[in-house]
Image: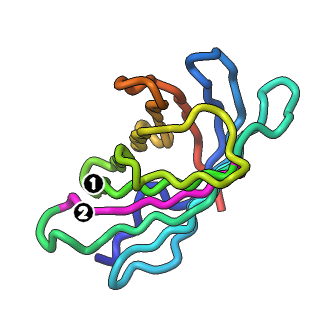
Amino acid sequence: MSRVPFIVGSWKGKGKVLPKGIEYLESSTFLLLRTEPATIINWQQFTKHVETLKPMHAENGFLKILPKPEEGEVKKAELMLSHPFSVNEYYKTAHFDFAQNIFECLADTEDCFQRGPAAGGKPATGSRRIYKLEDGKLVYDMYLRTEGSDEFVHHLHCEMEKIPE
């Protein structure tokens, strides 16, 4: 499985925190570390407010694309992310579709979230992400479920262009 996933590279663009209508600038880097036996990608994402340029969020982690199943273009995957607000996420239900250029992942059980003692805000109980390549742009949507709710809310939408190397 020595293919390079579509997400690899450095990307910049603009997004929106949909429930609040806040726009942000994003820069993300997905660095390919290896392709055998599994594909490992270092994941780094940073956002800042579109007007004030004040930093808003960052996340760091690893995407692992497994060589299973052996046949076909859709592979199982795992995504682990750490956030500066003392929360870790483990997306254990995930797949990477090499033919359609789509990566989808879901964290929806209690063991998918780890909160440090300094974590504030309402605890997340679910997160779903969809990344896809559309007309050369990396487009993603993130859906969030918080404590006290059964529904996922469309939380983020972002579109980025690849930065030439």
Q: Residue at 42% across / 43% down in the picture?
A: 131
Q: Residue 123, position in %: x, y?
A: 55, 37
How many numbered callouts? 2
Q: Main secondary structure of the magenta part?
A: strand
Which contiguous range is marked in magenta? 73-85
Q: Residue at 64% across / 16% down in the picture?
A: 20
Q: Quadrant of the C terminus?
A: bottom right
Q: Which mark is residue 75?
A: 2
The vertical placement of 64 against 23, above or below, is below
Q: Secondary structure at mark 1?
A: strand
Q: Is residue 29 visible?
A: no
**Depth order, front residue of 74/89:** 89
Q: Residue at 40% across / 78% down in the picture?
A: 35
Q: Quadrant of the N terminus?
A: bottom left
The vertical placement of 139 against 163, above or below, is above
Q: Amino acid at mark 1?
A: Asp
Q: Amino acid at mark 2?
A: Lys
Q: According to the image, label 1 marks what residue?
A: 97
Q: Residue 34, position in %: x, y?
A: 46, 80
